[in-house]
Amino acid sequence: MDYEKQKNQIQKVFIKLESEGKQVLYLFFSEMGTINRMGDGSNEGISRFFMGQTEDPVFQDFMEEFPAELLSLAGRYTFPNPQGEICFLEITLEGEEINTGFAFTYGADSEGPPEEIFELVNLALDLSDPWYEDQLNQKKRN
């Protein structure tokens, strides 16, 4: 399978994280600059949802760091014997000829997704943080 070709077909990225059934992160961004975000992945504080556009190359920078070979792991995974809060992490990758991704159900204090998956989620958060913080600050001023 040509994972590099698949990677190049991706136009949209969705990331969703739930902890104990509560959505703590929702992040969508596309190659067209659309961005939607709620939360930071933690159970702390009030999560606000914002939709908009960004001039920042969030999608391009994310895809630049996305390892094409990671697509070989696409699928749904449930880890046995979960310890701690039950978490559900989903990353969906879409484009004209692609609809794939990853879904993990795991315990917060036990085995979970591979480190590369957490690194991608953290990268997406880091790249979208400036936009999200700006939205939060605008909301505070209004």
Image: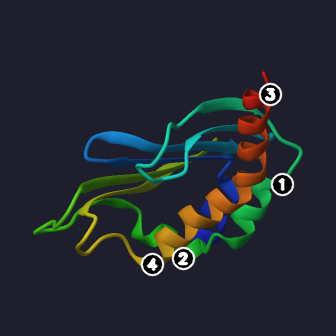
Query: Mark 4 or 2 closer to N-term?
Result: 2
Question: Which residue does the numbered mark 1 point to in the structure image?
Answer: 57
Residue 87 on image: x %, y %: 29, 55
Which amino acid lies under the numbered mark 1 shown in the image of this protein? Pro
Q: Residue furthest front?
A: 141
Across and down, in percent, residue 13 comes to: 60, 48
Name the element at disc 1: loop
Q: Are marks 4 and 2 in contact (CB under 8 Å)?
A: no
Sequence-earlier tag: 1 or 4: 1
Whole-angstrom CA distance, mark 4 to mark 2, is 14 Å
Tell me the element at label 4: helix
Q: Which one is earlier in the sequence, the residue at label 4 or at label 3?
A: 4
Packing grade of label 3 (10 A; few <14, some 14-19, many >=20) is few
Residue flagged by tag 3: what amino acid is it? Arg
Q: Is residue 98 above or below residue 36?
A: below
Front tag of 4 and 2: 4
Please report whichever mark, 1 or 3, sits nearer to the chain's N-terminal start.
Answer: 1
| Residue at mark 2 | 69
Disc 4 marks a residue whose amino acid type is: Glu
Q: Quadrant of the C terminus?
A: top right
Quick one: SS at disc 3?
helix
Q: Label 2 neighbourhood size at 10 Å, few (<14), some (14-19), many (20+)?
A: some
Mark 4 lies on residue = 115
Extreme residue in the top direction: 142
Q: CA distance from mark 2 to mark 1?
A: 22 Å
Q: Which residue is mark 3?
A: 141
Please tell me which residue is depicted at 69% across the width and 47% down the height of the picture.
Answer: 11
Q: Residue at x 38, y 54 (%)?
A: 89
**Residue pushed farthest right?**
55
Q: CA distance from mark 4 to mark 3?
A: 38 Å
Which residue does the image show at 10% across and 69% down from the upper left? 81
